[in-house]
Amino acid sequence: MELNIFDRIKDIYPSLGHSSKSIADYFLANQTNASSKTVTELAGDCHVSVATISRFAKQLGYTNYSQLKWALSNQMSKSAPTIQEVADTDTPKMVAKKTLDANIETLNGTFDLMDEKDLEKAVNLIVHAKKLEFFGLGGSNIVALDAYHKFLRVPLNVLHDTEYHLALMQASRMSDSDCAVVISHTGNDTDTLEIAEALRSKHVPIIVITSFPNSPLAEYGNVDFFSISEDSRYRSEALLSLTSQLAINDCLYMLTAQYFGKSAEIVLDEIRSTISKKHPA
């Protein structure tokens, strides 16, 4: 885990201006619930502008308040975990309950990090894209494939390549009229970063899904979404993050389907009709 956020606030406190000190004081005095505040709520509580909140986040080394909020939420979950570990003596029903409780907590945390403007911006990029391609390697390929499978149900030209070199080739053929969704748990996989760099060289708008806001990949995103996850005894952080990332896919898909409305219904009906021929009643 990175340097404790509250220690970092104390380190830079002497160099802060009056308004930023008000925010710092609030964070230090409300360590347990600061991460639950929206940027508007925090601005109101601290009697500062939203722009001042954003500037404060950058002073701490984050790109925006959403990244700071994610880091704070993750830090608090690490220091005071509420997910119950699976024990060797647990019954099957208890294992199931602990597993589902962990998934529910992960989804709630992911929702808390979502920003209305980020969702609107992401959907605007998606629905106006001539081509929409999903990129993910390793475990993230599962998430990319899931997104591809979902977005086939809307009237968009959707692409996905499971093989790295083919994906890199596709990235080199995209343009600023397209949109790419790049998924990586760590955000520092070198092959994924090569794809992101190829996309940026072509000025392709990028939506990033990752678990680490300070990762190199997050710097490539026109819009970033962050998945929350936590190590447990039998599930790695990366494995649990799949729950969050699949849910982010769902949100983006539903917003896109909502935008297209009747057109999306027609595509879905055509898919159902085609599949029904293979599986007659």
Image: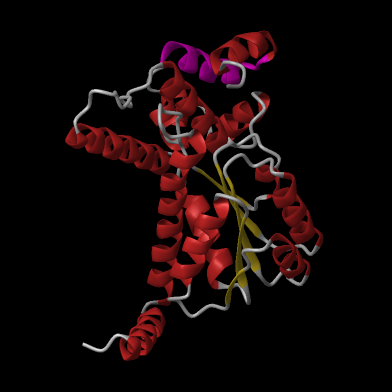
Q: Give the image's coloring scheme.
A: secondary structure
Above or below, 238 relative to 135: above
- The outermost residue toward the right is 201
Residue 20 belongs to the span the image colors magenta: yes
- The outermost residue toward the front is 88
The residue sitting at 25% across, 34% down in the picture is 95
Nearer the observer, 96 or 214? 96
Indicate left or right for 44 with 167 as reference: left
Above or below, 252 relative to 44: below
Image quadrant holding the C terminus, namely bottom left
Above or below, 142 relative to 276: above
Q: How many marks?
A: 0
Q: Position of residue 14 (x, y in %)?
A: 67, 8
Q: Position of residue 246 (x, y in %)?
A: 43, 53
Q: Which residues are magenta?
A: 16-31
Task: Examine the image and state in which quarter residue 129 appears.
Answer: bottom right
The residue sitting at 44% across, 68% down in the picture is 150
Indicate left or right for 3 with 69 as reference: right
Nearer the observer, 255 or 190? 190
Task: Examine the image and state in which quarter residue 15 appears.
Answer: top right
Nearer the observer, 16 or 89? 89
- Tell me the chief SS of the magenta region: helix
The residue sitting at 46% across, 37% down in the picture is 228
Image quadrant holding the N terminus, namely top right
The residue sitting at 48% across, 80% down in the picture is 155
Task: Examine the image and state in which quarter residue 79 appears.
Answer: top left
Indicate left or right for 72 with 51 as reference: left
Q: Position of residue 158 (x, y in %)?
A: 56, 74
Nearer the observer, 119 or 178? 178
